[in-house]
């Protein structure tokens, strides 16, 4: 009897199925920088173990209700060993939120200002505070927000409270 061989390479559909996301979501994560692009080999393109670990870690962090920007920052700071531990943190499937649907591609004509996102908007954030202001409306405030932004969040929350008192 031959020893069991562990899989180290996956086609896109296999990788997506192994983690419980769609192939489109995997492509979206590559586009956003959450996953590195695999070496392109046409129809023979394969994803490696790091892709699998990062996808599993993304799912764990989504179960903690982190937005994708915060997840990206978290993944960037993790060592390979910490990434493996996070990816292997087994959560019951019922606790995982459904994967976000990848948005439709934006046509160039829809962009108000073409070009990359300004560096000031690309900062990594360790965590957020979240308030439900009304059903279906949430306010997320980064722990790293400056005092002016915190004051703005407090004013928005106060306005919502005032409108509920009426």
Image (cartoon, helix red, strand yellow):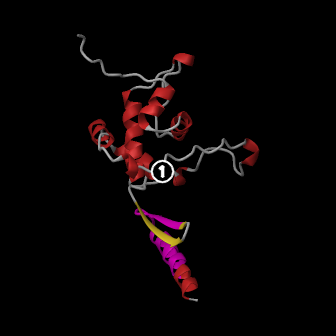
* Residue 145 drawn in magenta: yes
* Residue pointed to by mark 1: 69
Q: Position of residue 45 (x, y in %)?
A: 51, 20
Mark 1 crowd level (few <14, some 14–19, many ≥20, 10 Å Cα): some
Q: Position of residue 91 (x, y in %)?
A: 33, 47
Residue for point 37% across, 31% down: 50
Q: Nearer the viewer, residue 130 or 148?
A: 130
Residue for point 53% across, 41% down: 32
* Left or right of 85 in this view: 163: right
Q: Which residues are magenta?
A: 138-158
Can you tell which quarter of the image residue 163 is in? bottom right
Residue for point 76% across, 45% down: 109
* Left or right of 47 in this view: 163: right
Q: Nearer the viewer, residue 27 or 89?
A: 89
Is 12 placed above or below 90 here?
Answer: above
Q: How many marks?
A: 1
Q: Residue furthest bottom?
A: 166
Quarter of the figure that contains the C terminus: bottom right
């Amino acid at each position: 009897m031959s020893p069991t061989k562990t899989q180290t390479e996956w086609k896109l559909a296999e990788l997506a199925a192994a983690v419980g996301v769609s192939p489109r979501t995997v492509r979206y994560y590559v586009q956003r920088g959450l996953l590195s692009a695999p070496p392109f080999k046409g129809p023979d393109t394969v994803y490696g173990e790091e892709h699998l670990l990062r996808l599993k870690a993304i799912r764990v962090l989504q179960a903690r209700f982190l937005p994708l920007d915060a997840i990206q920052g978290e993944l960037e700071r993790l060592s390979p060993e910490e990434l493996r531990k996070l990816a292997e943190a087994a959560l019951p499937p019922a606790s995982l939120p459904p994967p976000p649907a990848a948005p439709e591609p934006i046509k160039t004509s829809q962009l108000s200002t073409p070009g990359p996102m300004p560096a000031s908007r690309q900062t990594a954030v360790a965590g957020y505070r979240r308030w439900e202001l009304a059903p279906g409306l949430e306010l997320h405030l980064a722990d790293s927000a400056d005092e002016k932004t915190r004051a703005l969040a407090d004013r928005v929350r106060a306005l919502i409270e005032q409108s509920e008192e009426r």
